[in-house]
Image (cartoon, grey):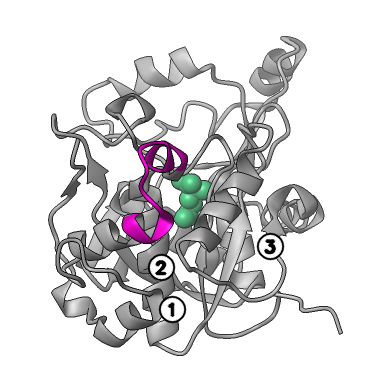
Amino acid sequence: MPNNADNAAHTGRFAPSPSGDLHLGNLRTALLAWLFARSTGRRFVVRVEDLDRVRPGAQQRQLDDLAAIGLDWDGDVVHQSARLPLYDAAITRLHRAGLTYECFCTRKEILEAAAAPHAPAGAYPGTCRNLTPEERDERRAGGRPPAIRLRAGTDTFTVHDELHGHYTGTVDDLVLRRGDGIPAYNLAVVVDDAAQGIDQVVRGDDLLSSAPRQAYLAGLLDLPAPTYAHVPLALNSDGKRLAKRDGAVTLADQQALGRTPADVLSVLASSLGLAAEGETVTVEQLLDRWDPRTLPREPWIFPS
Ligand code: GLU
């Protein structure tokens, strides 16, 4: 029988975008997602978020790197690019419920409008929400294909996060389908998490502010919202998000310096307080030692 990840209950996940190699901060987040899932008896799945920004070969290297540090996952890896009908169905459902509208704004127009006083930070200001049919026809005639936005019925929503407690964040008329036809990240994540039985989302805390939008959208689609744990990111010594230019940041970079995947796992484990510096460990040992209450709440400053 094919081992299908869909429709399973109690599942955690790691959902990388194959836009390049994973850096050690990403591997640390993956390790945390695995520990959160496995320590709670959950299945663990990998979903490749390949609707956008795909770099040839990156996907396989990402999977190889996850396996090299000892992580395993259940069922086949799921690719978002193979699931377009699911996203279409969700958008159609929202459309039929009167919860969508076409947006003709350019990025520049949105930035300008969002800079207006009283506009909630980072929120779409609703420029195209109430266009008259004439105005809409006029914009359509401009020839630029519109994005499809959600007609949100609230401007905030509260989620529960295992590390951040109750977190209230902005909900705006988020994009469901981009002007180029690609389903938007928020929509795809919500549809997939529910379809895959994912009830625990562990990811970097740069995505904490997306969680209220996603949980609200899940509710509109009658889908359960998962529990969340947004974990601290890896930063460089300047306090900026870790990036390629920050030195030997990938497993391949580390291997070029003579460090094995086991050495890298050891570094990740000690950064999480789960191993002594230089101690060789396996992920199973880390699972035995794992206690989410002891997870460092500060960003990990990558040792350059
Ligand atoms: N694919 C997203 C990323 O790599 C993560 C999405 C998610 O975990 O919800 O940043």
From the top left corner, tell me how far across and down residue 177 is, in percent.
65, 39
Q: Say whether mark 2 is within 8 Å of ligand 1.
A: no
Kindly report the distance in space between the C-alpha atoms of the residues bearing marks 1 and 3. 16 Å
Picture quarter with the N terminus: bottom right
Within 10 Å of disc 3 (Cα), the crowding (few <14, some 14-19, many 20+) is some
Q: Residue furthest top?
A: 142
Q: How many marks?
A: 3
Q: Quadrant of residue 5?
A: bottom right
Q: Residue under label 3, please give it.
A: 77
Q: What kind of residue is marked 2?
A: Ala
In the rendered image, the vertical position of residue 85 relative to residue 147, given as above or below: below
Q: Residue under label 2, please give it.
A: 33
Lower position in the chain sequence, tag 3 or tag 2: 2
Q: Residue at x 59, y 41 (%)?
A: 18
Q: What kind of residue is marked 3?
A: Val
Q: Residue at x 53, y 50 (%)?
A: 16
- Relative placement, left or right, of 221 versus 122 is right
Please report the bounds of the magenta region as a residue range. Answer: 252-263
**The magenta stretch spans residue 172:** no
Provide the major secondary structure of the magenta segment.
helix
Whether label 2 touches label 1, CB < 8 Å: yes
- Relative placement, left or right, of 199 versus 167 is right
Viewer-side residue, 296 vs 177: 296
**The magenta stretch spans residue 253:** yes
Kindly report the distance in space between the C-alpha atoms of the residues bearing marks 2 and 1. 6 Å
Residue 289 seen: yes
Viewer-side residue, 135 vs 41: 41
Q: Residue under label 1, please give it.
A: 37
From the top left corner, tell me how far across and down residue 262 is, in percent.
38, 61
